[in-house]
Image: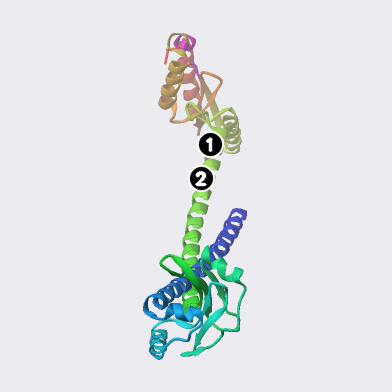
Amino acid sequence: MRRLVLVLSVLILAATAGFAYLRSRTEQLLRHDAVAVASDWSLYLVRTTPEFLLILAGELPSLSTLDAYRHAERLSRVRAFEIFDRRGTMRMTFAGGQPIDGRTASVPLVTLAGSRDGPLVEMEQGAGDLARVTLPLRVAGHVVGYLVASVDQDGLRSTYLAQALQTAMSIAVLLLLLAILVHARLGFQQRKSAAQIRYLARNDALTGLPNRQAFIEALDDMLARDAAHDRETAVMLIDIDRFMQVNDALGQEGGDHVLSAVAERLATGCNGRHGGKARRRHFRCHHQQRCRDHRGRAGRRAHSRSPV
């Protein structure tokens, strides 16, 4: 349960961080969009306005130029723009399809000059989804003035945020599925490890036979049940003759192989391994005659001491 809570907490943090990143990415996309629209507009002004340099010098545009601006404004997302000369003096403001003479207005030159290193973008307060972009106007590679354009981004923010939310939810679902798979795998490995530990705690690692503790517990349980049913229990000890010679001749690996082979042959009914070479075999006696028969056969085998 703790692991699951931890995984869910990590997923929540990851989803929150992912959504914050995608929201930041949305702001970047909006900025790039505003800069692209304003840059296209600046190129339009410089390349299609015959008297552009005269406007920077303080002259008003001609009627044909104003008509061209109105037509271009309807096709573009630029809702208003301002033209400044190199000294930061406003030469023209165009908004709502009408020019406004703004020669007396000025802005700090340092603010405009800062756009030379890169376009300046800020959201206009109380103006809806309008981005105010400041960038230099260049003629033949030289800065001759500055443009401040208000770009309409109505609907783009919600679109980008919806896409970001959808992406974040998809990532969260994938992470949740991944967490469930990891949790299930960890649980399976934990149960497998616990079963392996329980097995090694009661079985010999080499032969797989029950160890001393498991043998004693099984024998105590058998003795108790046989006593309750008035039955006897016989325990037979099996030795491997000349086992030390096998170890000396073949080494420990050879001795282990012999032990494993003997364990496989004696596995049926064999109750455990005790020490380095001994095996115990038990027989349940359901009546006295069968018990005596088992004891007699075990005694004869022990007396003959035939090598295994």
In this view, 295 is above or below 81: above
At horizontal 48% and vertical 56% (from top left) the residue drawn is: 178
In the picture, the disc for residue 199 is 1
Residue at 47% over, 24% down:
294
- Amino acid marked by disc 2: Gln
Between residues 168 and 71, which one lies in front from this camera angle?
71
Q: Foreground: 16 or 229? A: 16
Q: Amino acid at mark 1?
A: Tyr
Residue range highlighted in magenta: 238-247
**Residue drawn at point x = 49 percent, y = 26 percent:** 206
Q: Is residue 54 above or below residue 262?
A: below
How packed mark 1 is, by other alpha carbons closer than 10 Å (few <14, some 14-19, many 20 or more), is some
Q: Which residue is mark 2?
A: 189
Q: Secondary structure at mark 2?
A: helix
> How many labels, in total?
2
Placement of 114 over or under 85, stated as above or below: above
User: Which numbered disc, 2 or 1, marks the residue closer to the eye?
Assistant: 2
Q: Secondary structure at mark 1?
A: helix
Q: CA distance from mark 2 to mark 1?
A: 15 Å
> Image quadrant of residue 232?
top right
Task: Tell me which label, 2 or 1, sits earlier in the chain.
Answer: 2
How far from the left and from the top, in percent, is residue 48? 37, 79
Q: Residues within 10 Å of mark 2 (few under 14, many from 20)?
A: few
Q: For the C terminus, which image quadrant?
A: top left
Q: Are marks 2 and 1 in contact (CB under 8 Å)?
A: no
Residue 151 visible in the current orientation: no
In this orientation, which residue lies closer to the viewer: 4 or 162?
Answer: 162
Q: Residue at x 51, y 82 (%)?
A: 58
Q: Is residue 168 visible?
A: yes
